[in-house]
Structure formats: C-alpha cells, structure tokens
Image (cartoon, rainbow, N blue to C red):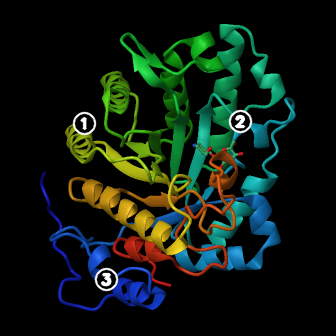
Amino acid sequence: MRQSEPDRHIGALTRRDALVAAAGVASAAMLAPGPGLAAARPIPFGSAAQIETFRADPRYRQALTSYCDVIVPMNDLKWEAIRHDRSRFDFSGADELVAFAERSGKSLRGHALLWGEALPPWAKEISTRAEAERELVQHIETVVDRYKGRIATWDVVNEVIKFEPLPGEPMRDTIWQRLLGPAHVEIAFRTAARIDPKARLVLNDFNFEEPGPGPAARRKIALDLCRRLKDKGIPVHGIGLQAHLYADKPLDIDGLQGFMVELGKLDLDVEITELDVIDWKLPADTATRDRAAASLVGTFLDAIVSVRRPKAIVTWGLSDRYSWVHETFPRKDGARARPLPLDADFRPKPMMAVLDRYRRSQS
Ligand code: 9MR
C-alpha cells in the first residue's frame, strides 16, 4: 500500500520517545513508526466528554483542556438526553460542553442525530411511517439549528449498518429502518444539510477493521450508502470509523487501506471517531497491556494515515478512570480496563505517545 507521509521524527529524540522511556514500559524502538508513517502535518485530536464527569472532576476538565483540539459530547446530544420529555428539548448538558469548547478554542463534533439506541421510552413507541419521519425531521431541524455554525461536524447517522450483513440486507434493524426503510439515512442527511449547509456530515459506524467477510461487507455497505447519497445530490462528507479496537483480535490492514482508497475515489474524508482499546482478554500485567494497546493503535492509525489523512482522531474518553469499556467488557480478574491514552490518574500512557505522532496540540 502507498505510504505517502515523510517521517519527521527519524533521527530525533521525540517527546514520544521520552515518554516511553520515562514510563519504562516499552522501548522506543517498539513504538517507532515504520519508515514514512508519522504525520507530516498534525491531525486534530480530541475526545468524547461526559458531562457528569466534566462537572465533577477538575482534573478531567484540565485534561480535556490540555490535550484536546476537538470535543465531542459523549451522550448529551443523543435523543435520550435531549428528548427525555417529548414536548420540549433539553440542551442543558450539550450547551455546557459546547460552551466549554468554545471558550477554550476547541472545535466540536456532534454525536449523533440518528441512532437506533439511546432513545427515550416515548420514541420507541413511534408506530407509523408518517410519525417517524415527522419526529426525525423535527429533531434534526431543531438540534442542528441550535448549533448551526458552532458544531462543525455531525455524526448524522450512527450504526445504521447491520452487524453481520446478509446479501440484500445491509441495514441494521432499528425503529428507523422498520418504519422508514433505508430512506431514513437519506432523510437524516438531507435534513441536516438543509439546516446547516456548511456543516460536515458523517456516516459513523464500527467494525470496519477486523478481518473476515462481515467487516468487508460493512465497508462496502458504508461506501454504497455514501455513493447513493452523492448520486442523489445529498451531501455526505465523510465516514467515521469508531475504532473500538479489540486487543485480542487482528486488524485487516489491507482491507482498511483498500477502504481508504475507495473513500478517496468518492472524495470522502475519514475520521477516527471513538478510538479505544478493549483489553479484557489481555494478561493482567499493566505494562504489557499498555504496550499492546499502544502498538495496536499505532498499527491501526499508520495503516489509515499512510493512505488517507483523517480529519480528526477522537478517543472515546480520555482517562482510564472513566470508560464504558469497564462495564461492557469486564475482565475476569476484576482488574480495571486500560482502554484510553491517560491512566486513571491522568498520566499519559504509551498510547498517548503514539497519538503524539499525529496530535496538533502538544501539552
Ligand atoms: O459511552 C457511551 C455510554 O456512556 C452510553 O451509556 C451509551 C448509550 O448512550 O453510549 C456509549 O457510547 C457509544 C456511542 O454513542 C456509539 N458507539 C458505541 C459507544 C459505546 O457503546
């Protein structure tokens, strides 16, 4: 595969090397980028931020300030948060995170306008096509309009692709798919573009990176969905790779790089939107786990960046102190998961050293 970026680090002791050496958990050589793979131009780095933690923990706020160029409200732009009450929109959590990002000069990604999960109970009872379309359009109009010109990028649809797609059955079974069919994707993109024509609009999904027919089919479906939107003149600017990487599973480097080539042909951007490492099957030793996670993230990002430069690299949380991975993928030995670039005490781990190859703001 093509490797286009010159390695600006070769021959110099980088901050990454220093961090790695200080941490004493891996030799710099183990984390060194392959020739030509480090970023020539930095890529905006960010993190999804949880409002409860943001409010409660000053160290977390400080870490967001120091490390991030981009902030993504993790849950506060979801239907569940904004629409818990059918008759009114509650933007309190999102507003707080948006205000924080604005006063600290950070850009914003909005997550997510349409998803089959994180819906309030009333929305799960929507029962007709007309009602579904009316609610979906009104929701997107209201949310996008509120942050018009402020939230630069939207995950317009999240996880609309079937987990293991079958021939002729590409779409995930959600309330939107059941009531509107595949047109729900089009309706969502068209509405977002109408309200904020300058916003960057992204199709966000997961499991594009594992080997096998399932992920290959998912990549093809993502491209087909975007191609169809473009053919109809509906704007779509990129595909978001969630990248919840399993430390115990291999990556399909050729598959990923081929995907990047195809994205390029369609003039679509790539964004890494929810990066973290699921380490539940790794040995207990923390240094071993951290080294494996850093190496996996490096391999993944190098594969992408060597073909197509992401518009942003966003991790799903910032510190191991707070992550969905603890609950969703509990370790048998009861040890805390270590999915993120900062440890539970906000100290940078080897993964942060790898991310430093690409990051814009150097704290
Ligand atoms: O991390 C998020 C967790 O706090 C929420 O309870 C959950 C439901 O809203 O969503 C989690 O984030 C998900 C994201 O929105 C979409 N991709 C998968 C993420 C992890 O489940």
Q: Position of residue 145 (x, y in %)?
A: 64, 43
Mark closer to the chain start, 3 or 1? 3
Q: Position of residue 54 (x, y in %)?
A: 75, 67
Mark closer to the chain start, 2 or 3? 3
SS assignment at label 3: helix
Q: Dot 2: within a 10 Å radius of its alpha carbon, few (fewer than 14), some, or many (20 or more) residues?
A: some
| Foreground label between 2 and 3 | 3
Residue 359 visible in rendering: no
Mark 1 Cβ and ligand 1 under 8 Å apart = no
Dot 1 corresponds to which residue? 266
Image position of 245 (left or right of 333): left
Question: How far apart in space, not on screen, are marks 1 and 2 (Cα)?
Answer: 31 Å
Marks 2 & 3, CB-CB < 8 Å contact: no
Question: How far apart in space, not on screen, are marks 3 and 1 (Cα)?
Answer: 37 Å
Q: Position of residue 330 (x, y in %)?
A: 66, 51
| Amino acid at pointer 1 | Leu
Mark 2 Cβ and ligand 1 under 8 Å apart = yes
Among the 4 quarters of the image, the one containing residue 83: top right
Image position of 295 (left or right of 264): right
Dot 2 corresponds to which residue? 118
SS assignment at label 1: loop
| Amino acid at pointer 3 | Ala
- 338 is higher (above) or lower (below) than 230: below
Marks 1 & 2, CB-CB < 8 Å contact: no
Q: Dot 1: within a 10 Å radius of its alpha carbon, few (fewer than 14), some, or many (20 or more) residues?
A: some
| Amino acid at pointer 2 | Ala
Residue beneath the point at 57% across and 18% down = 173
| Foreground label between 3 and 1 | 3
Picture disc at residue 28: 3
Mark 3 Cβ and ligand 1 under 8 Å apart = no
- 45 is higher (above) or lower (below) than 176: below
Residue beneath the point at 53% across and 37% down = 156
